[in-house]
Every structure is written in C-alpha cells, then in structure tokens.
Image (spheres, rainbow, N blue to C red):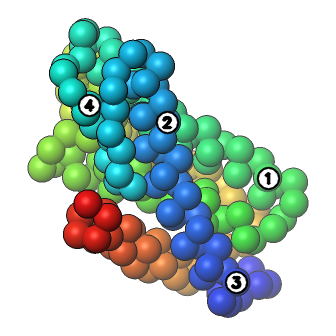
Amino acid sequence: MNSSINIKYILITIIAVVSSFFLHELAHFITGELLGYKMGMTLNSVFLSEGAYQSAWHEQLVSAAGPLFTITQAFIVFYIIRRTKNDYWYPFLFFAFYSRVLAMLISIITPNDEARISEWMGLGYWILPLIVSFILLILLIKTSKEQRYNLKFNLINYLLATVCITIVVYSDQYLLK
C-alpha cells in the first residue's frame, strides 16, 4: 500500500465506526417503527419502548434490518474502493466485517442479530453468523489483495477499530444514558 495511516485516516476511521454503529441501529429502529412499534434507540442498541412484538416474524425482521444494512454498506464500499482506489473508504468496509465478527463472538454470551435469526430459522446459533462473516471476509481479502493492503495495514485497522468500538460501547453504556 502506498498511503500511510495519518491523522485524516484515523479521523475517517472514527467517522466510519460511529456512523456505521448509528446507521446499523437506525435500520433496526426504522424497521420497528414501520411495523408499528414504539422503538427506543441508543448508539449501540434498539429496543421496544413499550409492549412486545406481535409476532416472532416482526422480531426477526427488526433483528435482520441492522445486519442487512451492514452487508449492503460493505458491498457498496467494496465497489467504491474498486472504482476509485481510494484508501479512505477502507475503514467502512473493515468495520462492516469486524462488527459482524464481534457480534458473532458476543453470541457466545447472548445471541446477537444473526444468531437470533439463525436459531429462529432452525439453523442453530452459528450458521447465519458464520455465513455473513465469511462473505464479508471475502470482500475484505479481495480488497486487500487488489489494493495491496498488507497485514500491517490490516492490523492497524483492527487496532483503530477496536479503540473506536471500545469508546462507542463505553459511551453508550455510561455517558449517553
């Protein structure tokens, strides 16, 4: 890779993480509202403000909306990077992959979006999370090969995303509530 990690890249990574969190949760929120539910939202969660889902189908649609947005984001950014060769889009693709892998790992403790849907479909907790993570990993690997992003660059992205995620989750739990 010819470009280096600089202040602009770090700021774009922060924007990528925060906006991706927000838009993922917003997709859940909007879906719930469109289905007629009163929803609440933070930067890292969406919840029913009152009552319960009228059907399991509604609950699964709300659960699916966030990951569907994230997967769509990844494919759009993948094609933007391919066309523009602009390194500054990469944090949006990297975070899409990383966030779904983290969601899968968190499902060990409590089922996350894809794990809940996968279980509801009778596939067990792991099939859908693994499929989504694998698809996003393929996009990440193809982009890294095409753009010549080396392991060091990806490790730096991992560290930047981890710090940003930690700040978002901490802020959401302790500062924004």
- The tag earlier along the polypeptide, 3 or 4, is 3
* Residue type of the residue flagged with mark 4: Leu
- Label 2: which secondary element: helix
- Mark 3 or mark 4, which is nearer to you? 4
> Would you call the spot at circle 4 few (<14 residues within 10 Å), some (14-19), or many (20 or more)?
some
Cβ–Cβ below 8 Å for labels 3 and 1?
Answer: no
Cβ–Cβ below 8 Å for labels 2 and 1?
Answer: no
* Residue type of the residue flagged with mark 3: Lys
In this view, 77 is above or below 146: above
User: Percent from the top left, x then y, of residue 160?
Assistant: 48, 79
Q: Name the residue under label 1.
A: 80
* Residue type of the residue flagged with mark 2: Ala
Q: Name the residue under label 3.
A: 8
* Residue at image point 36% right, 44% down: 41
The Cα–Cα distance between marks 3 and 2, rounded to whole angstroms, is: 28 Å
- The tag earlier along the polypeptide, 2 or 1, is 2
- Label 3: which secondary element: helix
| Nearest to the observer: residue 52 or residue 61 | 52
| 10 on left or right of 148 | left
In this view, 101 is above or below 173: above
- The tag earlier along the polypeptide, 4 or 1, is 4
User: Percent from the top left, x then y, of residue 35?
Assistant: 41, 15
Q: Mark 4 points at which residue?
A: 48
In this view, 70 is above or below 87: above
User: Percent from the top left, x then y, of residue 105?
Assistant: 25, 53
The answer to which quarter of the image holds residue 146 is bottom right
- Mark 2 or mark 1, which is nearer to you? 2
Cβ–Cβ below 8 Å for labels 4 and 1?
Answer: no
